[in-house]
Amino acid sequence: MTARLQAARRKDDPGEQNERRAAMAVYAQASVGELSSGLQACGTHAHHELRPPETGLVMVRGRISGDGAPFNFGEATVTRAAVQLANGAVGFSYVLGRDRQKARLAALADALWQSGRHREQVEKNVLAPVRARIEAESRRRHEETAATRVSFFTLVRGED
């Protein structure tokens, strides 16, 4: 089976799509330093830019209560990029803000993740440290919130 046919089958797999979606969400929350150091640990990989990082605006839409009529909430600045590895894997990224380097690194990480040979390296060197940081921040925020919790209770008076 050719590499392109295997890649096409993986793209159709809903589990694969969900895993990639989760990985891309982690790239979006990563800092440039985390992406850069993680990718350096994965080694250097020949790639070229299909779409150099470019910045634009997107309309953000919202709904009241999650199921109400959609409305235009406002605009957000987004930077996008696309890179292709020498083996043909194509990575994309869209990141909030104007950080071109982060968009380029996230696209490279996405392309490497899609390549079967490099996925374990990306999981270990890029995704795992960022997930650990996000989990630690979430735990710390939860502990801070729990420390300010007030329990209200009512004493029952003996009168009926």
Image (cartoon, grey):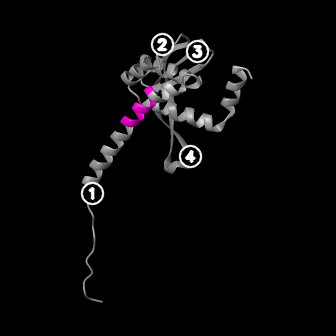
Dominant secondary structure of the magenta stretch?
A: helix
Q: Is residue 20 visible?
A: yes
Q: CA distance from mark 2 to mark 4?
A: 48 Å
Helix, strand or loop at label 4? It is loop
Q: CA distance from mark 3 to mark 1?
A: 50 Å
Query: At which x and y percent is residue 11?
Result: 66, 30
Q: Which residue is mark 4?
A: 69
Helix, strand or loop at label 2? It is loop
Helix, strand or loop at label 1? It is loop
Q: Which residues are magenta?
A: 125-133
Are the residues flagged by discs 4 and 3 in contact, CB closer than 8 Å?
A: no
* Between discs 1 and 2, the one toward the N terminus: 2
* Between discs 3 and 1, the one toward the N terminus: 3
Query: At which x and y percent is residue 36?
Result: 40, 19
Q: Does the stretch in magenta take in 128?
A: yes
Circle 3: is it few (<14), some (14-19), or many (20+) Cα within 10 Å? many
Rendered-image quadrant of the C terminus: bottom left
Mark nearest the camera among 1 and 2 is 2
Q: Is residue 105 above or below residue 159?
A: above
Identity, as a three-letter code, of the amino acid under mark 4: Ala
Are the residues flagged by discs 4 and 1 in contact, CB closer than 8 Å?
A: no
Q: Which residue is mark 1?
A: 149
Q: Which residue is mark 3?
A: 84
Which circle marks residue 44 in the picture?
Answer: 2
Mark nearest the camera among 4 and 1 is 1
Identity, as a three-letter code, of the amino acid under mark 2: Thr
Are the residues flagged by discs 2 and 4 in contact, CB closer than 8 Å?
A: no
Q: Does the stretch in magenta take in 83?
A: no
Identity, as a three-letter code, of the amino acid under mark 3: Gln
Total numbered badges shown on the rendered structure:
4
* Between discs 4 and 1, the one toward the N terminus: 4
* Residue occupying image coordinates x 54% and y 26%: 119
